[in-house]
Image (tube, helix red, strand yellow):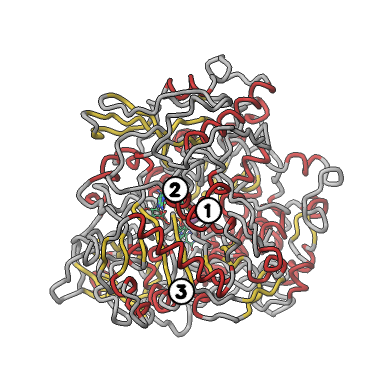
Amino acid sequence: MGEVRNTDSIDSSRRSALRTIGLFSTVPFIGGAWIGCGDSSSSSATAEAPTMSSFSTDLVLDGDVYTAAHWGALKVSVKGGKIVKSQNAFSGLEANPLQAVTADLVDGKYTNRIKAPMVRKSYLEKQAGNNKLRGADEWVEVSYEEAIKIVSDEIKRVRSSKGPTAIYGGSYGWKSSGNMHNARTLLHRFLNLGGGFVGGLGDYSTGAAQVIMPHVLGTLEVYEQQTAWPLVLEHSQVVVIWGANPADTLRIAWSSNDNQGLEYLKKLRDSGKKIICIDPAKSSTVQFFGSKAEHIVVVPNTDVAFMLGIIHTMLTSGNYDKDFIANYTEGFDKFQDYVVGKTDGVAKDAQWASSICGVSEEKIKELAEVFFGNRTMIMGGWNMQRQHHGEQAHWMLVVLASMIGQIGLPGGGFGFSYHYSNGGAPTTNAPVVGGISVGKATSGGAEWLSDGSAVSIPVARVTDMLANPGKTIQHNGKVIKYPEIDFVYWAGGNPFVHHQDTNTLLAAWRKPTTVVVHDMYWTPTAKMADVVFPITTPYERNDITMSGDYSNMNINPMKQVVAPLEKAKSDYQVFSDLAEACGFGAQYTEGKSDMDWIEEFYNAAYDNAQKAGVVMADGNAMPDFKTFWGANKPLVFDATPEGLEFVRYADFREDPILNPLGTPSGKIEIYSKTIEKMNYKDCKAFPQWFEPAEWKGMKEKSAEFALISPHPSLRLHSQLANTSLRDEYAVSDREPIWINPADAEAKGIKNGDVVRAFNKRGQILVGAVVSDIVPQGVVRIYEGAWYDPEDAAQANTLCKNGNANVLTMDIPTSELANGNSACTAMINIEKYTGAAPKNTAFLPPKGA
Ligand SMILES: Nc1nc2c(c(=O)[nH]1)N[C@H]1C(S)=C(S)[C@@H](COP(=O)(O)OP(=O)(O)OC[C@H]3O[C@@H](n4cnc5c(=O)[nH]c(N)nc54)[C@H](O)[C@@H]3O)O[C@H]1N2
Ligand SMILES: Nc1nc2c(c(=O)[nH]1)N[C@H]1C(S)=C(S)[C@@H](COP(=O)(O)OP(=O)(O)OC[C@H]3O[C@@H](n4cnc5c(=O)[nH]c(N)nc54)[C@H](O)[C@@H]3O)O[C@H]1N2
Ligand SMILES: [Mo]
């Protein structure tokens, strides 16, 4: 991991789980002789293609259509060509409110579609210095052909005058489900075939963990299959949910949700096991378990100190698994010196830990006994590594689990993906359905690619890169030099919502000459572009996906549900036409329509299934494509015996010599010589407590309240914000902020008040929810609110809708991983007494 590469890094890392656990690892290519026009909307004329079957892509005007989204396989009911209902494709599952709002995503009261190709006025007029007006200008509609010409001419200009390192195509984001209409991959295919580009390295989700874990365990760990849930239910005595909120976060998955995680969570609740949630807030998960779980409130950003208190207690009492430490880990002795204070004079005992993390000394000591004395599964979430020095949290947790000594036993150890994409749902025998590929950089790339330093930049360093061309940074033992970016292309992500310290981003974003964005909606990022293309929603095009990133439980047809908005095109269509205008249209499409590709992806999986004799859950063999597409239903596959009995690290435990880990020592590295050699100040050879740049217990506080910004219950980041779900949470037409009653009283704030939240980085308006969901001194604003600047031409302008990232810190977790530190921030709050300006987050910009 951590090598510099110009591939679709989220796709490939998240999909590594599929590759390692799926039955079939390769998707052989089936060439079609059919020469199409690359038009994704004219897709039915495949009769002449010898390898393609014929099928109907006619729209259902009255009836049910099956599709899928991150939030699950969907059955959508249509009447007179309009969506009237949307629900889970399967019945009897835990309700998932995200599945019900499909109609709003096509056309609802907040939907705010981009209806035509548009160009920012002063950009179109080529006014000097027009980039300074980005986000504060009028928009002008142009014809599709004109938009294609503007963008293709510009990208040709930048390529020939400045080379591929002037084009940033990192385009981080959650796009939509679908193996064909995969916006980011389609963009990368376009930029690669055109001659290369600067990409993004890693992701926002696990920026720190996915770089530290390979040093410690030899795998990414965060995107790997977990010990099967049935074994947890059978063997675990204690289940610790440490900084995770599965009741919310299991509502979605990277491919599509198989909905198994929430079912297992229900079984866990009813199991009578000891359940412990460690979280600063009464999260949805804490509320879901109610009296069945113990909630331990921890000061945000202090889990490492908390863990050290438990570790110190175990170490000094001798109640830990010395055999496991001796046989399966490396470097405990040096770490031990740090724990007892030999190296720095500070014993990391329960008292020391308690003074930092706010958990009582007694509780810390009790947990040391409970964990060691019972079969304990620690399910760790990711928020605690999306913090300054985030590498330390997961590393320390692995050390704690090593001392407990149950790694590799059924129901014991730790898991970093039970809360995400249904980790632990047993793997089935389904063949893996592949998707469109990023292609290879063909021209002008060779020489450039040999200078690996400029190929990919850690995703969350995007502002730093745009603002500081030529600057060098450290990254996981390598040096990266920032290129000078002149062209930014984004498709399928929303950086003006997801990235930290929005005001600094905005200044840096105005440096390049051109910014192009594809989206379905006038998102804050679309409003910050020069050219936008109106994109079809997934309900307006055909596609295919699997559900269950770890289970591979279903193959879902994603059939077009409704006719597309008049001028909307799929990303595939736009990139095909741009490629054509740039002279490599045939390479881009390989002569295939979207349906041709979809059939090809399916057929490859089908062939593999046939070879392996795969039988589906209903006892039948997989249908051929025509039957599958015509049947309009997801395919269901059963868990295999191996899937049901999978214990993470069982083979390593059985024989650490024959089955070593992929670390230099082959063991769990509590001490890493590799990291020691990097000689970083902020990530050292063993995990330790570093004081975060901002936190509740700091000496000279820059602001009064610790801000937590976890993932929203009723959205996927910024997605679904523009649906009727918003009516369920918006307060005074703003994003809610949860404030403890004592703090609210001290500030004279009441439920429903408009609140100004601010710090030295920015200011936002939010709506008060006065509640003991958060402890005193901590406030919560979910990430994902659409940024809505009052006057984007002014520095430090007010965000009228309440995007938490206006207030968060844009600093790397450390020089090792350069992950984002979104969840480390202090802020102030006050009642807003002026006339609150109108929220315009869900309105189109001027001219549109
Ligand atoms: N403060 C704070 N900030 C955070 C986090 C946090 O915990 N706290 N978490 C971080 C994490 S883990 C993540 S993953 C990021 C998420 O950040 P993003 O992945 O950028 O968030 P999304 O809202 O999913 O953005 C997806 C965008 O793609 C668009 N889209 C969907 N389908 C298509 C398509 O087919 N074509 C095109 N062209 N566009 C499409 C959607 O309309 C939307 O605008 O946020 C990060 N930011
Ligand atoms: N509904 C829904 N589900 C999602 C997403 C979404 O946007 N909406 N996003 C998806 C994505 S891209 C990702 S990366 C995952 C994110 O998965 P996570 O990163 O695990 O989720 P978060 O919601 O950021 O945080 C989980 C819990 O950590 C708590 N927490 C905050 N600070 C601390 C702390 O310092 N210590 C401890 N112990 N706990 C803390 C929060 O209160 C929250 O309850 O979720 C995925 N699932
Ligand atoms: Mo994420």
Q: Nearer the viewer, residue 542 or 13?
A: 542
**Residue 449: % across, % down:** 68, 65
Residue at figure coordinates x 40%, y 46% from the top left: 570
Left or right of 548: which side holds 195? right
In this view, the residue in front, 88 or 450, is 450
Amino acid marked by disc 3: Met
Q: Is mark 2 within 8 Å of ligand 2?
A: yes
x then y, percent, for residue 583: 54, 55
Query: Quadrant location of residue 526?
Result: bottom left
Marked residue nearer the N-terminal end (1 or 2):
2
Q: How many marks?
A: 3
The residue sitting at the bottom extreme is 700
Considering only vertical position in the picture, is 201 above or below 112? below
Name the element at disc 3.
Answer: loop
Residue pointed to by mark 1: 381
- Mark 3 and mark 2 in contact? Answer it, CB < 8 Å: no
Mark 1 or mark 3, which has the lower sequence index?
A: 1
- Residue at the image position 27 percent from the left and 47 percent from the top: 725
Q: Is residue 467 left or right of residue 676?
A: left
Ligand 1 lies in quarter: bottom left
The kind of secondary structure element at disc 2 is helix
State the image quarter where residue 31 is shown: top right
Give the SS element for disc 1: loop
Q: Is mark 1 within 8 Å of ligand 2?
A: yes
Q: Which residue is mark 2?
A: 249
Residue 276 visible within the image: yes
Instruction: Give, as a three-letter code, the residue at label 2.
Output: Thr
Q: Position of residue 718 (x, y in %)?
A: 36, 56
